[in-house]
Image (cartoon, rainbow, N blue to C red):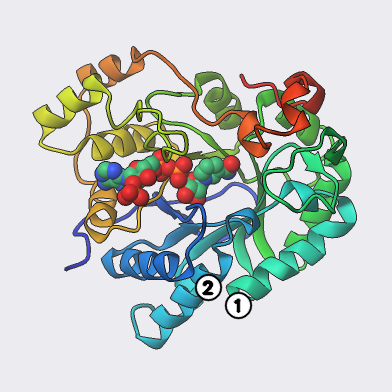
Amino acid sequence: MAASSSVVPEVALRSGNARPMPAVGMGTASFPPVHEAAKSGVLAAIEVGFRHFDTAFAYGTEKPLGDAVAEAVSRGLIRSRDEVFVTSKLWCTQSHPDLVLPSLRQTLENLQMEYVDLYLIHWPVCLKPGAATFPPNRKEDAVPLDVEGVWRAMEECQRLGLAKAIGVSNFTTRHLDRLLATAAVPPAVNQVELNPVWQQRTLRAYCAEKGIHVTAYSALGGQSWDGQPNAVLESPVLAEIAAARKKTVAQVALRWIYEQGVTPIVKTYNKERLKQNLEIFDWELTEEDRLNISQIPQKKVVMHTVLFSPEGEFTLVDPADLNIVEE
Ligand SMILES: NC(=O)c1ccc[n+]([C@@H]2O[C@H](COP(=O)([O-])OP(=O)(O)OC[C@H]3O[C@@H](n4cnc5c(N)ncnc54)[C@H](OP(=O)(O)O)[C@@H]3O)[C@@H](O)[C@H]2O)c1
């Protein structure tokens, strides 16, 4: 199959020294992680033209992503690792000032890389270092996040050149206010759930004002962990627009995200879908499409509870105590 004909634009981040970020990224979260599936998915993505990849320590896909990039170099699909933009994330059990640098070194070893382009604090939540099981279930495992100390350690990762840029994920405007009050290096990126069904207008306006680039996870409504219908892929409004534009619903959703100045991160290992997900840059939505999408009823999918075992004591904790109230 030929590579996508669409040229992927790039976004210059306002903080850090990362190369420009390609305006669509491939997600690699898939549970349980299967090494071969993830590796061949990333290789397929590179073949069709993806150059931006999203992983995390918690996904268990750093190693297959690194293996795929190494193989892509040895097969001549790309000249070097520098041609790809790689994001990884610090897990909640690692969000302790003294664990940030060792955790990034572990991530780099998994990726077999000398640097990540972007390193994010995965959640504004801190779990005790020992609570490595996922999801954790004892409420004693949640401890206050020392956001100032953790961010200083993130800044050190950037200073050492191990992360070209640093940022956060799942931070609300309140979390960002707290972080920006003390940060010497402002976060380059906030990665949050964002799609036509969870549009995040307030957060987007806030980040635009502060020069923080927003990337969108669950860009197509997320993977169906609990068997719930997918509110994006099954949206009648998006289906109608897709039919009129001769595009797929996925393309309409990704195009809408891109038009908001946000970078979608989308997961599939399927080559045909990967190709489709890149073909969003040579056409646009109409004013009427945008108006119709702006009126879609809003529904958040990824709740803080995904972090915790449904059988555990965490379900008894008031989310406000964990400082991760959804907004
Ligand atoms: N920072 C965070 O806390 C956080 C949280 C969640 C996710 N993420 C990141 O964001 C990435 C994307 O989010 P996500 O994995 O939640 O879900 P998503 O990208 O919204 O994907 C949802 C589903 O859409 C399907 N899909 C993909 N392309 C398609 C197309 N062209 N047509 C039809 N269906 C298509 C995929 O199915 P198939 O796989 O069967 O093709 C996938 O299961 C993750 O992989 C991860 O890297 C970050």
* Pointer 2 residue Cβ closer than 8 Å to ligand 1: no
Residue 203 to residue 265: above or below: above
| Pointers 1 and 2 in contact (C-beta within 8 Å) | yes
Q: Is residue 138 left or right of residue 233?
A: right
Q: Residue furthest front?
A: 311
Pick the residue in front: 10 or 310.
310
Q: Provide the secondary structure element on which disc 1 rests.
A: loop
Q: Is residue 5 left or right of residue 55?
A: left
What residue is shown at x 78% (from left), y 28% (from top)? 322
Residue position for label 2: 66
Instruction: Say which amino acid is labelled 1.
Output: Gln
Q: Quadrant of the N terminus?
A: bottom left
Residue 294 to residue 94: above or below: above
* Pointer 1 residue Cβ closer than 8 Å to ligand 1: no
Q: Provide the secondary structure element on which disc 2 rests.
A: helix
Instruction: Tell me where residue 88 appears, x and y as whole percent.
Output: 60, 57
What residue is shown at x 31% (from left), y 34% (from top)? 253
Instruction: Tell me where residue 125 appears, x and y as whole percent.
Output: 76, 37
Residue position for label 1: 112
Instruction: Tell me where residue 101 appears, x and y as whole percent.
Output: 80, 63
Residue 308 to residue 18: above or below: above
Q: How many marks?
A: 2
Rendered image quadrant of residue 243: top left
